[in-house]
Amino acid sequence: MLKHYLLAASALLLLGLASCKKENISPANQGDAFVKYYGYVNDQIGKDVKQTADKGFIIAGSSNSFVNASSYNDFYLIKTDSLGNEEWSKTFGDGGNGYEETGHRVLVLSDESGYLVAGNRTTVVTVGGQSTLDATYIVLYKLDLDGNIVWEKVLFDGNTLASSETYKDFVYDIKELPYGGFVLVGETTDLNVKAEYIEYAEYDKTDMLTVRLSTEGQVLWRVKRGFVGEDRAVSVEVINGAYIVIGTSQSLDEENSTPANPNFTTEILTIRFRASSGGEVSQEGFGGQDMFVVAGGSCYDSLNARITILGHVENRDPTRNEVNEGDLMLLQIGEDLGEIQRRYLGKTNGGFSNATEDLLSGSIALVPSDVVGNDPSFVISAVKEYDEANFGDELVMAKISADLTPEWDGQIREFGRASVNNSSQALAGNQAGTVMPIRELVPGTTRRELKGYLMTGTMNLATNPMVTLIKTNTEGLLTPEN
Protein backbone atom coordinates (compact mmCIF):
# COMPACT_ATOMS: atom_id res chain seq x y z
CA MET A 1 0.00 0.00 0.00
CA LEU A 2 1.28 3.43 -0.83
CA LYS A 3 2.03 5.66 2.08
CA HIS A 4 0.40 9.05 2.40
CA TYR A 5 2.80 11.91 2.84
CA LEU A 6 1.86 14.98 4.78
CA LEU A 7 3.49 18.07 3.35
CA ALA A 8 3.35 20.66 6.12
CA ALA A 9 4.15 24.08 4.79
CA SER A 10 6.21 26.68 6.58
CA ALA A 11 5.30 30.17 5.50
CA LEU A 12 6.79 33.64 5.33
CA LEU A 13 4.07 36.25 5.68
CA LEU A 14 4.71 39.54 3.93
CA LEU A 15 1.94 42.03 3.16
CA GLY A 16 -0.65 39.28 2.88
CA LEU A 17 1.57 37.06 0.66
CA ALA A 18 2.81 33.70 1.91
CA SER A 19 5.32 31.63 -0.01
CA CYS A 20 7.36 28.49 0.54
CA LYS A 21 9.50 25.98 -1.36
CA LYS A 22 9.79 22.24 -0.69
CA GLU A 23 12.31 19.46 -1.10
CA ASN A 24 11.41 16.50 -3.36
CA ILE A 25 10.50 13.56 -1.14
CA SER A 26 8.52 11.22 -3.41
CA PRO A 27 9.97 7.75 -3.91
CA ALA A 28 10.56 6.62 -7.49
CA ASN A 29 7.53 4.31 -7.56
CA GLN A 30 5.12 7.22 -7.20
CA GLY A 31 5.32 8.14 -10.87
CA ASP A 32 2.10 6.22 -11.50
CA ALA A 33 0.14 6.94 -8.32
CA PHE A 34 0.29 8.98 -5.13
CA VAL A 35 -1.75 10.81 -2.50
CA LYS A 36 -0.32 14.10 -1.25
CA TYR A 37 -1.49 16.74 1.22
CA TYR A 38 -0.70 20.47 1.31
CA GLY A 39 -1.19 23.17 3.87
CA TYR A 40 -0.36 24.00 7.44
CA VAL A 41 -2.37 24.42 10.64
CA ASN A 42 -6.03 25.48 10.61
CA ASP A 43 -8.07 24.94 7.42
CA GLN A 44 -7.31 24.39 3.73
CA ILE A 45 -9.72 23.80 0.83
CA GLY A 46 -8.71 22.34 -2.56
CA LYS A 47 -10.93 23.32 -5.50
CA ASP A 48 -9.23 23.12 -8.89
CA VAL A 49 -6.15 21.63 -10.56
CA LYS A 50 -4.55 21.89 -14.00
CA GLN A 51 -1.50 20.24 -15.57
CA THR A 52 1.32 22.62 -16.44
CA ALA A 53 3.68 22.65 -19.43
CA ASP A 54 6.49 21.09 -17.35
CA LYS A 55 4.20 18.09 -16.54
CA GLY A 56 3.64 19.38 -13.03
CA PHE A 57 0.38 20.64 -11.53
CA ILE A 58 -1.11 23.91 -10.29
CA ILE A 59 -3.78 23.75 -7.55
CA ALA A 60 -6.13 26.53 -6.47
CA GLY A 61 -8.10 26.78 -3.25
CA SER A 62 -8.22 28.61 0.05
CA SER A 63 -6.38 28.66 3.37
CA ASN A 64 -6.51 30.50 6.70
CA SER A 65 -3.28 28.92 7.92
CA PHE A 66 -0.70 31.51 6.96
CA VAL A 67 -1.82 34.49 9.05
CA ASN A 68 -1.68 34.64 12.81
CA ALA A 69 -5.10 34.49 14.47
CA SER A 70 -6.95 34.81 11.16
CA SER A 71 -10.47 33.42 11.09
CA TYR A 72 -10.92 34.00 7.36
CA ASN A 73 -9.48 32.48 4.20
CA ASP A 74 -7.06 33.83 1.62
CA PHE A 75 -6.60 32.56 -1.94
CA TYR A 76 -4.18 29.61 -1.90
CA LEU A 77 -2.09 28.47 -4.90
CA ILE A 78 0.23 25.45 -4.97
CA LYS A 79 2.67 24.48 -7.74
CA THR A 80 3.97 20.89 -7.78
CA ASP A 81 6.19 18.76 -9.98
CA SER A 82 4.89 15.67 -11.79
CA LEU A 83 5.21 13.59 -8.60
CA GLY A 84 3.15 16.00 -6.52
CA ASN A 85 6.16 17.47 -4.72
CA GLU A 86 5.44 21.07 -3.78
CA GLU A 87 7.73 23.49 -5.62
CA TRP A 88 6.12 26.62 -4.19
CA SER A 89 2.90 27.81 -2.62
CA LYS A 90 1.47 31.28 -2.19
CA THR A 91 -1.51 32.98 -0.62
CA PHE A 92 -3.13 36.15 -1.96
CA GLY A 93 -5.38 38.51 -0.10
CA ASP A 94 -5.45 40.96 2.73
CA GLY A 95 -3.68 38.54 5.07
CA GLY A 96 -6.04 39.26 7.93
CA ASN A 97 -9.63 39.41 9.03
CA GLY A 98 -10.90 42.07 6.64
CA TYR A 99 -12.05 39.67 3.90
CA GLU A 100 -13.19 36.09 3.43
CA GLU A 101 -11.50 35.02 0.16
CA THR A 102 -12.04 31.73 -1.64
CA GLY A 103 -10.25 30.52 -4.77
CA HIS A 104 -12.41 28.50 -7.18
CA ARG A 105 -10.67 28.15 -10.55
CA VAL A 106 -7.16 28.29 -12.00
CA LEU A 107 -6.30 28.46 -15.71
CA VAL A 108 -2.96 27.77 -17.36
CA LEU A 109 -2.90 30.55 -19.96
CA SER A 110 -2.72 29.35 -23.55
CA ASP A 111 0.41 31.40 -24.28
CA GLU A 112 2.09 29.65 -21.30
CA SER A 113 2.98 33.01 -19.75
CA GLY A 114 1.40 32.17 -16.42
CA TYR A 115 -1.91 31.53 -14.68
CA LEU A 116 -5.28 33.12 -14.06
CA VAL A 117 -6.96 32.55 -10.68
CA ALA A 118 -10.66 33.34 -10.14
CA GLY A 119 -12.45 33.48 -6.82
CA ASN A 120 -14.67 35.41 -4.46
CA ARG A 121 -13.91 38.15 -1.92
CA THR A 122 -16.44 38.91 0.81
CA THR A 123 -16.06 41.97 3.02
CA VAL A 124 -16.08 41.30 6.76
CA VAL A 125 -17.80 44.03 8.80
CA THR A 126 -17.08 44.10 12.52
CA VAL A 127 -19.29 46.15 14.85
CA GLY A 128 -19.15 45.86 18.61
CA GLY A 129 -16.94 42.81 18.42
CA GLN A 130 -19.42 40.96 16.18
CA SER A 131 -18.34 40.15 12.61
CA THR A 132 -20.70 39.65 9.69
CA LEU A 133 -20.14 38.98 5.98
CA ASP A 134 -21.24 41.78 3.65
CA ALA A 135 -20.75 42.42 -0.08
CA THR A 136 -19.07 39.76 -2.23
CA TYR A 137 -17.01 40.55 -5.32
CA ILE A 138 -15.44 38.37 -8.01
CA VAL A 139 -11.64 38.69 -7.98
CA LEU A 140 -9.20 37.74 -10.74
CA TYR A 141 -5.42 37.41 -10.41
CA LYS A 142 -3.10 37.11 -13.38
CA LEU A 143 0.17 35.52 -12.25
CA ASP A 144 3.49 34.76 -13.89
CA LEU A 145 4.94 31.25 -13.89
CA ASP A 146 6.49 31.80 -10.46
CA GLY A 147 3.18 32.88 -8.94
CA ASN A 148 3.98 36.61 -8.84
CA ILE A 149 1.03 38.95 -9.38
CA VAL A 150 0.91 40.60 -12.82
CA TRP A 151 -2.46 42.25 -12.20
CA GLU A 152 -5.46 42.01 -9.91
CA LYS A 153 -9.04 42.82 -10.93
CA VAL A 154 -11.99 43.20 -8.55
CA LEU A 155 -15.19 43.09 -10.59
CA PHE A 156 -18.07 45.46 -9.75
CA ASP A 157 -16.39 46.58 -6.53
CA GLY A 158 -18.64 49.01 -4.69
CA ASN A 159 -21.72 48.48 -6.87
CA THR A 160 -25.02 48.76 -5.05
CA LEU A 161 -28.65 48.00 -5.61
CA ALA A 162 -31.29 50.67 -6.10
CA SER A 163 -31.91 50.45 -2.35
CA SER A 164 -28.20 51.32 -1.78
CA GLU A 165 -27.60 47.88 -0.31
CA THR A 166 -24.54 46.06 -1.58
CA TYR A 167 -25.08 42.93 -3.62
CA LYS A 168 -23.11 39.69 -3.86
CA ASP A 169 -21.48 38.20 -6.98
CA PHE A 170 -19.93 34.72 -7.03
CA VAL A 171 -17.85 32.99 -9.71
CA TYR A 172 -17.98 29.19 -10.13
CA ASP A 173 -16.40 28.63 -13.54
CA ILE A 174 -14.20 30.52 -16.02
CA LYS A 175 -12.86 29.60 -19.46
CA GLU A 176 -10.17 31.20 -21.62
CA LEU A 177 -11.44 32.00 -25.11
CA PRO A 178 -9.58 30.95 -28.28
CA TYR A 179 -10.09 34.46 -29.71
CA GLY A 180 -8.84 36.24 -26.58
CA GLY A 181 -10.24 37.05 -23.18
CA PHE A 182 -12.39 35.02 -20.81
CA VAL A 183 -15.98 34.15 -19.98
CA LEU A 184 -17.09 33.43 -16.41
CA VAL A 185 -20.32 32.29 -14.80
CA GLY A 186 -21.74 32.24 -11.29
CA GLU A 187 -24.58 33.86 -9.40
CA THR A 188 -25.60 37.31 -8.18
CA THR A 189 -28.03 38.87 -5.73
CA ASP A 190 -28.35 41.85 -8.11
CA LEU A 191 -31.76 40.67 -9.32
CA ASN A 192 -34.11 41.38 -12.18
CA VAL A 193 -37.47 40.89 -10.46
CA LYS A 194 -40.10 40.12 -13.07
CA ALA A 195 -43.35 42.09 -12.92
CA GLU A 196 -45.51 38.96 -13.05
CA TYR A 197 -43.80 37.62 -9.91
CA ILE A 198 -43.75 40.84 -7.90
CA GLU A 199 -45.90 39.26 -5.16
CA TYR A 200 -43.20 36.61 -4.70
CA ALA A 201 -40.23 39.02 -4.79
CA GLU A 202 -39.17 38.18 -1.22
CA TYR A 203 -38.43 34.61 -2.33
CA ASP A 204 -36.18 35.71 -5.21
CA LYS A 205 -32.65 35.19 -3.87
CA THR A 206 -30.13 34.79 -6.73
CA ASP A 207 -29.87 34.94 -10.54
CA MET A 208 -27.49 33.22 -12.94
CA LEU A 209 -24.57 35.47 -13.90
CA THR A 210 -22.50 35.44 -17.12
CA VAL A 211 -19.64 37.91 -17.73
CA ARG A 212 -17.41 38.37 -20.80
CA LEU A 213 -13.93 39.75 -20.11
CA SER A 214 -11.03 41.09 -22.15
CA THR A 215 -7.52 39.62 -21.93
CA GLU A 216 -6.77 42.23 -19.25
CA GLY A 217 -9.83 41.37 -17.19
CA GLN A 218 -11.98 44.31 -18.27
CA VAL A 219 -15.73 43.67 -18.34
CA LEU A 220 -17.15 43.70 -21.90
CA TRP A 221 -20.68 42.67 -20.98
CA ARG A 222 -22.64 41.24 -18.06
CA VAL A 223 -25.89 39.22 -18.30
CA LYS A 224 -28.26 38.12 -15.51
CA ARG A 225 -30.86 35.39 -15.96
CA GLY A 226 -33.28 33.83 -13.51
CA PHE A 227 -36.78 33.23 -12.33
CA VAL A 228 -38.27 33.82 -8.91
CA GLY A 229 -36.25 31.52 -6.62
CA GLU A 230 -32.55 30.62 -6.35
CA ASP A 231 -30.80 30.42 -9.72
CA ARG A 232 -27.09 29.82 -10.24
CA ALA A 233 -24.72 29.00 -13.11
CA VAL A 234 -22.01 26.45 -12.32
CA SER A 235 -20.26 25.88 -15.66
CA VAL A 236 -19.84 27.32 -19.15
CA GLU A 237 -18.87 25.67 -22.45
CA VAL A 238 -17.48 27.63 -25.42
CA ILE A 239 -19.01 26.47 -28.71
CA ASN A 240 -18.72 28.02 -32.21
CA GLY A 241 -19.32 31.67 -31.37
CA ALA A 242 -21.64 30.90 -28.48
CA TYR A 243 -21.52 30.14 -24.77
CA ILE A 244 -23.68 27.42 -23.27
CA VAL A 245 -24.24 28.09 -19.57
CA ILE A 246 -25.31 25.26 -17.27
CA GLY A 247 -26.85 25.66 -13.84
CA THR A 248 -29.92 25.09 -11.72
CA SER A 249 -33.06 27.17 -11.46
CA GLN A 250 -36.03 27.34 -9.13
CA SER A 251 -39.30 28.19 -10.82
CA LEU A 252 -42.69 28.80 -9.28
CA ASP A 253 -45.39 26.14 -9.49
CA GLU A 254 -48.05 28.73 -10.15
CA GLU A 255 -51.01 26.35 -9.98
CA ASN A 256 -50.10 25.24 -6.45
CA SER A 257 -48.69 28.47 -5.01
CA THR A 258 -49.84 31.55 -3.15
CA PRO A 259 -47.66 34.43 -1.88
CA ALA A 260 -48.13 33.07 1.65
CA ASN A 261 -47.35 29.49 0.66
CA PRO A 262 -45.14 29.30 -2.48
CA ASN A 263 -44.18 26.01 -4.07
CA PHE A 264 -40.98 25.81 -6.12
CA THR A 265 -39.61 23.18 -8.47
CA THR A 266 -35.90 22.85 -9.22
CA GLU A 267 -34.52 21.94 -12.61
CA ILE A 268 -31.32 21.97 -14.60
CA LEU A 269 -31.29 25.06 -16.77
CA THR A 270 -29.15 25.44 -19.89
CA ILE A 271 -28.89 28.72 -21.83
CA ARG A 272 -27.17 29.50 -25.11
CA PHE A 273 -25.77 33.05 -25.37
CA ARG A 274 -24.23 34.87 -28.33
CA ALA A 275 -20.51 35.30 -27.71
CA SER A 276 -20.44 38.75 -29.29
CA SER A 277 -23.16 40.43 -27.24
CA GLY A 278 -24.41 38.08 -24.55
CA GLY A 279 -27.82 37.99 -26.17
CA GLU A 280 -29.85 34.91 -25.31
CA VAL A 281 -30.45 32.54 -28.23
CA SER A 282 -32.36 29.74 -26.51
CA GLN A 283 -32.85 28.01 -23.16
CA GLU A 284 -33.98 24.57 -22.04
CA GLY A 285 -34.87 23.12 -18.64
CA PHE A 286 -34.60 19.50 -17.51
CA GLY A 287 -36.28 17.86 -14.54
CA GLY A 288 -38.66 19.63 -12.22
CA GLN A 289 -39.49 16.92 -9.67
CA ASP A 290 -35.99 15.94 -8.56
CA MET A 291 -34.05 18.46 -6.43
CA PHE A 292 -31.07 18.73 -8.75
CA VAL A 293 -27.70 20.04 -7.61
CA VAL A 294 -25.33 20.54 -10.56
CA ALA A 295 -22.21 21.03 -8.46
CA GLY A 296 -20.26 18.72 -10.76
CA GLY A 297 -20.38 21.02 -13.78
CA SER A 298 -19.98 19.83 -17.35
CA CYS A 299 -17.57 18.90 -20.14
CA TYR A 300 -17.75 19.37 -23.92
CA ASP A 301 -17.06 16.67 -26.50
CA SER A 302 -16.42 18.61 -29.74
CA LEU A 303 -15.98 15.39 -31.75
CA ASN A 304 -19.59 14.37 -31.13
CA ALA A 305 -20.95 17.90 -30.53
CA ARG A 306 -22.42 17.14 -27.12
CA ILE A 307 -22.19 18.34 -23.54
CA THR A 308 -22.26 15.97 -20.56
CA ILE A 309 -23.49 17.41 -17.27
CA LEU A 310 -22.76 15.93 -13.84
CA GLY A 311 -24.91 16.59 -10.81
CA HIS A 312 -26.68 14.76 -8.01
CA VAL A 313 -30.18 14.53 -6.63
CA GLU A 314 -30.49 16.04 -3.19
CA ASN A 315 -31.74 13.69 -0.50
CA ARG A 316 -34.31 15.90 1.22
CA ASP A 317 -35.53 13.26 3.68
CA PRO A 318 -33.06 10.42 4.35
CA THR A 319 -35.80 8.25 5.94
CA ARG A 320 -37.87 8.15 2.73
CA ASN A 321 -35.23 6.99 0.21
CA GLU A 322 -37.22 8.34 -2.71
CA VAL A 323 -36.39 7.42 -6.29
CA ASN A 324 -33.15 9.05 -7.52
CA GLU A 325 -32.43 10.79 -4.21
CA GLY A 326 -28.80 10.58 -3.18
CA ASP A 327 -27.73 9.39 -6.66
CA LEU A 328 -25.42 10.98 -9.20
CA MET A 329 -27.08 12.23 -12.37
CA LEU A 330 -25.46 12.32 -15.83
CA LEU A 331 -27.31 14.32 -18.47
CA GLN A 332 -26.09 14.56 -22.05
CA ILE A 333 -27.34 17.30 -24.39
CA GLY A 334 -26.52 18.50 -27.89
CA GLU A 335 -25.37 21.95 -28.97
CA ASP A 336 -29.04 22.74 -29.67
CA LEU A 337 -29.71 21.99 -25.95
CA GLY A 338 -31.82 18.93 -26.82
CA GLU A 339 -31.58 15.95 -24.45
CA ILE A 340 -29.63 12.96 -25.81
CA GLN A 341 -29.54 10.66 -22.81
CA ARG A 342 -29.76 10.67 -19.02
CA ARG A 343 -28.67 8.22 -16.34
CA TYR A 344 -28.87 8.01 -12.54
CA LEU A 345 -26.16 6.09 -10.69
CA GLY A 346 -25.97 5.29 -6.97
CA LYS A 347 -27.67 3.62 -4.05
CA THR A 348 -31.16 3.95 -5.56
CA ASN A 349 -30.58 3.14 -9.23
CA GLY A 350 -27.48 0.96 -9.00
CA GLY A 351 -24.72 1.07 -11.57
CA PHE A 352 -21.99 1.08 -8.92
CA SER A 353 -21.82 -2.15 -6.95
CA ASN A 354 -20.19 -0.45 -3.94
CA ALA A 355 -22.29 2.75 -3.77
CA THR A 356 -24.47 2.20 -0.68
CA GLU A 357 -24.53 5.81 0.57
CA ASP A 358 -25.41 9.23 -0.83
CA LEU A 359 -23.08 10.50 -3.55
CA LEU A 360 -22.37 14.22 -3.91
CA SER A 361 -21.07 15.29 -7.33
CA GLY A 362 -17.63 16.87 -7.56
CA SER A 363 -16.35 17.22 -11.14
CA ILE A 364 -16.48 15.65 -14.60
CA ALA A 365 -13.83 15.57 -17.35
CA LEU A 366 -13.74 14.21 -20.87
CA VAL A 367 -11.29 11.41 -21.67
CA PRO A 368 -10.81 12.17 -25.39
CA SER A 369 -11.01 9.62 -28.17
CA ASP A 370 -7.30 10.02 -28.98
CA VAL A 371 -6.44 8.09 -25.81
CA VAL A 372 -9.34 5.63 -25.59
CA GLY A 373 -10.24 4.69 -29.18
CA ASN A 374 -13.24 5.81 -31.18
CA ASP A 375 -15.59 6.79 -28.36
CA PRO A 376 -14.74 9.38 -25.69
CA SER A 377 -15.43 8.47 -22.08
CA PHE A 378 -15.59 10.39 -18.81
CA VAL A 379 -13.97 10.45 -15.40
CA ILE A 380 -15.85 11.89 -12.44
CA SER A 381 -15.14 12.79 -8.82
CA ALA A 382 -17.62 12.75 -5.96
CA VAL A 383 -18.00 12.36 -2.21
CA LYS A 384 -19.47 9.22 -0.66
CA GLU A 385 -21.38 10.51 2.35
CA TYR A 386 -21.41 8.03 5.23
CA ASP A 387 -24.00 8.23 7.98
CA GLU A 388 -23.14 9.13 11.58
CA ALA A 389 -22.76 5.49 12.64
CA ASN A 390 -19.97 5.00 10.09
CA PHE A 391 -18.27 8.37 10.58
CA GLY A 392 -16.85 10.67 7.99
CA ASP A 393 -16.89 10.88 4.20
CA GLU A 394 -14.89 9.37 1.35
CA LEU A 395 -13.46 10.97 -1.78
CA VAL A 396 -14.31 8.81 -4.79
CA MET A 397 -13.53 8.57 -8.50
CA ALA A 398 -15.37 6.69 -11.26
CA LYS A 399 -14.94 6.00 -14.97
CA ILE A 400 -18.02 6.35 -17.21
CA SER A 401 -18.29 5.12 -20.81
CA ALA A 402 -19.75 7.01 -23.76
CA ASP A 403 -23.19 5.48 -23.14
CA LEU A 404 -23.03 6.68 -19.49
CA THR A 405 -22.51 3.24 -17.96
CA PRO A 406 -19.82 2.65 -15.30
CA GLU A 407 -16.49 1.07 -16.19
CA TRP A 408 -13.85 -0.33 -13.79
CA ASP A 409 -16.10 -3.38 -13.20
CA GLY A 410 -18.91 -1.12 -12.06
CA GLN A 411 -17.08 0.15 -8.98
CA ILE A 412 -16.19 3.56 -7.65
CA ARG A 413 -12.64 4.02 -6.37
CA GLU A 414 -12.53 5.23 -2.77
CA PHE A 415 -9.75 7.32 -1.20
CA GLY A 416 -9.04 8.43 2.34
CA ARG A 417 -11.85 7.16 4.56
CA ALA A 418 -11.96 9.78 7.31
CA SER A 419 -12.45 7.12 9.99
CA VAL A 420 -12.19 3.35 10.32
CA ASN A 421 -15.27 3.23 12.57
CA ASN A 422 -13.27 2.73 15.75
CA SER A 423 -15.18 5.43 17.64
CA SER A 424 -12.04 7.57 17.79
CA GLN A 425 -13.09 10.49 15.58
CA ALA A 426 -15.91 11.32 13.21
CA LEU A 427 -14.34 13.38 10.42
CA ALA A 428 -16.82 14.65 7.87
CA GLY A 429 -16.63 17.53 5.44
CA ASN A 430 -14.33 16.06 2.79
CA GLN A 431 -14.83 17.83 -0.55
CA ALA A 432 -14.23 16.54 -4.08
CA GLY A 433 -12.65 19.04 -6.46
CA THR A 434 -11.56 18.89 -10.09
CA VAL A 435 -10.77 15.55 -11.77
CA MET A 436 -8.89 15.12 -15.04
CA PRO A 437 -7.12 12.55 -17.24
CA ILE A 438 -3.33 12.73 -17.44
CA ARG A 439 -2.21 12.56 -21.07
CA GLU A 440 1.31 12.67 -22.52
CA LEU A 441 2.61 12.78 -26.10
CA VAL A 442 4.05 9.52 -27.36
CA PRO A 443 7.63 10.32 -28.48
CA GLY A 444 7.93 10.70 -32.25
CA THR A 445 4.16 10.95 -32.78
CA THR A 446 1.30 13.43 -32.39
CA ARG A 447 -0.72 10.88 -30.38
CA ARG A 448 -1.37 11.35 -26.69
CA GLU A 449 -1.26 8.40 -24.35
CA LEU A 450 -3.37 8.09 -21.19
CA LYS A 451 -1.12 7.97 -18.10
CA GLY A 452 -3.71 7.94 -15.34
CA TYR A 453 -6.12 10.28 -13.56
CA LEU A 454 -5.74 13.20 -11.19
CA MET A 455 -8.12 14.78 -8.72
CA THR A 456 -7.87 17.44 -6.06
CA GLY A 457 -10.09 18.15 -3.11
CA THR A 458 -10.15 18.57 0.64
CA MET A 459 -9.46 15.82 3.15
CA ASN A 460 -9.91 16.07 6.90
CA LEU A 461 -6.80 14.51 8.43
CA ALA A 462 -7.82 14.38 12.12
CA THR A 463 -5.77 17.50 12.90
CA ASN A 464 -7.22 19.81 10.26
CA PRO A 465 -8.51 19.90 6.65
CA MET A 466 -5.78 19.82 4.01
CA VAL A 467 -5.64 20.27 0.25
CA THR A 468 -5.38 16.80 -1.29
CA LEU A 469 -3.94 15.70 -4.63
CA ILE A 470 -4.60 12.13 -5.80
CA LYS A 471 -2.98 10.59 -8.86
CA THR A 472 -4.06 7.09 -9.92
CA ASN A 473 -3.09 4.69 -12.66
CA THR A 474 -5.35 4.14 -15.69
CA GLU A 475 -7.61 1.83 -13.65
CA GLY A 476 -8.13 4.38 -10.91
CA LEU A 477 -5.89 2.49 -8.49
CA LEU A 478 -3.06 3.64 -6.22
CA THR A 479 -0.62 1.08 -7.55
CA PRO A 480 2.04 1.24 -10.29
CA GLU A 481 1.02 -0.01 -13.73
CA ASN A 482 2.19 -3.52 -14.63
Image: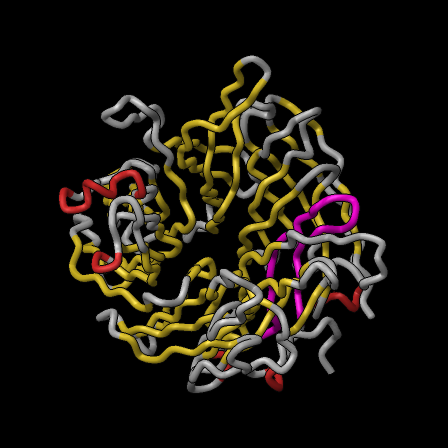
Where, quadrant-wise, is the N terminus in this rendering?
bottom right
Can you say whether 345 is above or below 239 in the image? below
Query: What stretch of residues is rendered in magenta?
Result: 449-472
Residue 428's spot in the image, x, y percent?
68, 53
Residue 452 lies in the magenta stretch = yes
Residue situated in front as seen by the camera: 202 or 146: 202
Q: Is residue 325 visible?
A: yes
**Dominant secondary structure of the magenta stretch?**
strand
Q: Is residue 474 visible?
A: no
Residue 381's spot in the image, x, y percent?
56, 65
Residue situated in front as seen by the camera: 293 or 1: 293
Residue positioned 70% across, 70% down in the render = 32
Number of numbered discs visible in the structure rendering: 0
Where, quadrant-wise, is the C terminus in this rendering?
bottom right
Residue 320's spot in the image, x, y percent?
53, 69
Can you say whether 437 is above or below 410 in the image? above
Q: Is residue 293 left or right of residue 12?
A: left
Residue 121 lies in the magenta stretch = no
